[in-house]
Amino acid sequence: KYTWVSDWYRQAMNNFWIPEEINLAQDLKDYNKLANEERTAYDKILSFLIFLDSIQTANLSNINNYITASEVNLCLTIQAFQEAVHSQSYSYMLDTICSPEKRNEILYQWKDDKILLERNKFIGELYNNFL
């Protein structure tokens, strides 16, 4: 019924990667060379994306419950899987570029940063209102 699904499916499957197959040696060097302001921006963006992809992974199945077209269900299932791969990628990045203490700081920075917390609350409220 939905002709766009076939093209989307092929594109989504071609976008697949395994995080640990990506060499992050240069990323480690580059991260350590960042100016404090650049590193702060990087860390905050990563913290935001970690939260965003984790909530997206958890909630796509809730949206999928309202979809009756099986081909669109397939798309949402693939997207949920890819969001989980993104989350795994962020963990791999953090494990590679920083200490365990810094890793935890970045993971949960969205809880202590006022702007990140406001954004995440807004997104969380949208999901809660949907459910």
Image: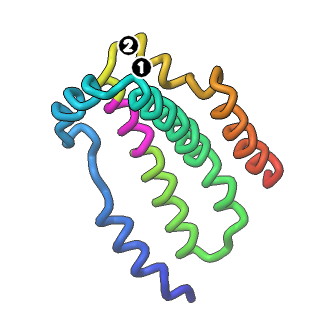
Give the image location of residue 56, x and y in percent.
59, 48
Q: Is residue 56 left or right of residue 74?
A: right
Judge whether 41 appears above or below 109 on screen. Answer: below
Give the image location of residue 35, x and y in percent.
34, 26
Q: Disc 2 designates what residue?
A: 100
Q: Is residue 12 left or right of residue 56?
A: left
Q: Is residue 92 magenta?
A: yes
Q: Disc 1 designates what residue?
A: 103
Residue 44 seen:
yes
Disc 2 and disc 1 in contact, CB within 8 angstroms:
yes
Q: Is residue 18 magenta?
A: no
Tell me if mark 1 has few (under 14), some (14-19) or many (20+) residues whose alpha carbon lies within 10 angstroms of its own: some
Judge whether 13 appears above or below 61 on screen. Answer: below
Q: Residue at x 50, y 67 (%)?
A: 75
Chain part drawn in magenta: 86-93
Q: Residue at x 56, y 23 (%)?
A: 109
Q: Looking at the picture, tell me which residue is in the foreground, 107 or 116.
A: 116
Name the quarter where the N terminus is drawn.
bottom right
Q: Looking at the picture, tell me which residue is in the foreground, 84 or 110.
A: 110
The amino acid on which the numbered mark 2 sits, given as a three-letter code, is: Pro
Q: Of helix, strand and loop, which mostly describes the magenta segment?
A: helix
